[in-house]
Image (spheres, grey):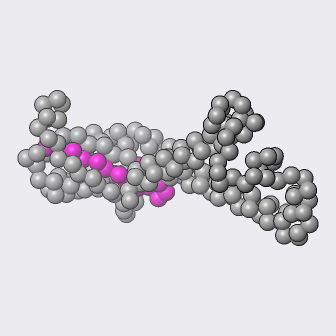
Amino acid sequence: MSVIGRGAVNRVLLGTVGLVLLGGGALLAVGDGSGLGQVGREVPDWWSERAAEGVLLDRDGLARMRENGWWTPAVIVALVLVLALSVRWLAAQVSASGPRWVSLRSTGLTLRRRAWERAMTSQAAAVDGVARARVRLAGRPLRAAVTLVVEPEARPAEVVRRVAAGVVADARRCAGVRALPTDVRVRVANRRERRTR
């Protein structure tokens, strides 16, 4: 899966978790469910009768659970583990987007990542046979995700070779690195897209 694809999956997953937590918080915030009409007042069939009549875990039940020596440490460990995994996931999301500034070792200059992406996109779009191009740089170490829309009469394999020999090789030389891992996606433009361009 490409860098861009992983980012989209992570964003969808994070959004889903956020919506579930928001919905659960909203249900808890209304208390007895009076603000939700019939949906909030009716208890599902699978819910225990004891929980439907009162709270899920009353003070006596909680005291009985705490009598077990493992209960409190288990709850604390579980919560710490959930927190650690959430922080790790958040850190991975931040680092996956890549650095905002990239150091070009060959020239000793520092370049904004978005500016480098735009320059690479312009260079890729100028290659013969390319109708449109898009370049994204992400991850550590840096990876390039290149999306090419080629003209119907162009040969995709030849266009990819030109982009690799020109755009990717120039980027690698500018960055002063031996390799710049690159994912290339190619799509052929249809005739309607060519007319509306």
Q: Main secondary structure of the magenta part?
A: strand
| Lateral position of residue 48 relative to residue 159, left or right | right
Give the extent of the magenta segment. Answer: 137-151
**Quadrant, the C terminus:** top left
| Lateral position of residue 43 relative to residue 130, left or right | right
As displayed, is residue 20 above or below residue 65?
A: above
As displayed, is residue 143 above or below residue 29?
A: below
Q: Is residue 146 magenta?
A: yes
Rendering quarter of residue 29: top right
| Lateral position of residue 150 relative to residue 111, left or right | left
**Front-most of residues 143 and 25:** 25
Rendering quarter of residue 73: bottom right
- What residue is shown at x 37% (from left), y 53% (from top)? 144
Q: Is residue 140 magenta?
A: yes
Where is residue 149 shown, x and y percent of the image?
21, 44
**Quadrant, the N terminus:** bottom left
| Lateral position of residue 194 relative to residue 163, left or right | left
Residue 107 seen in the current view: no
- What residue is shown at x 72% (from left), y 31% (from top)? 34
**Front-most of residues 98 and 102:** 98
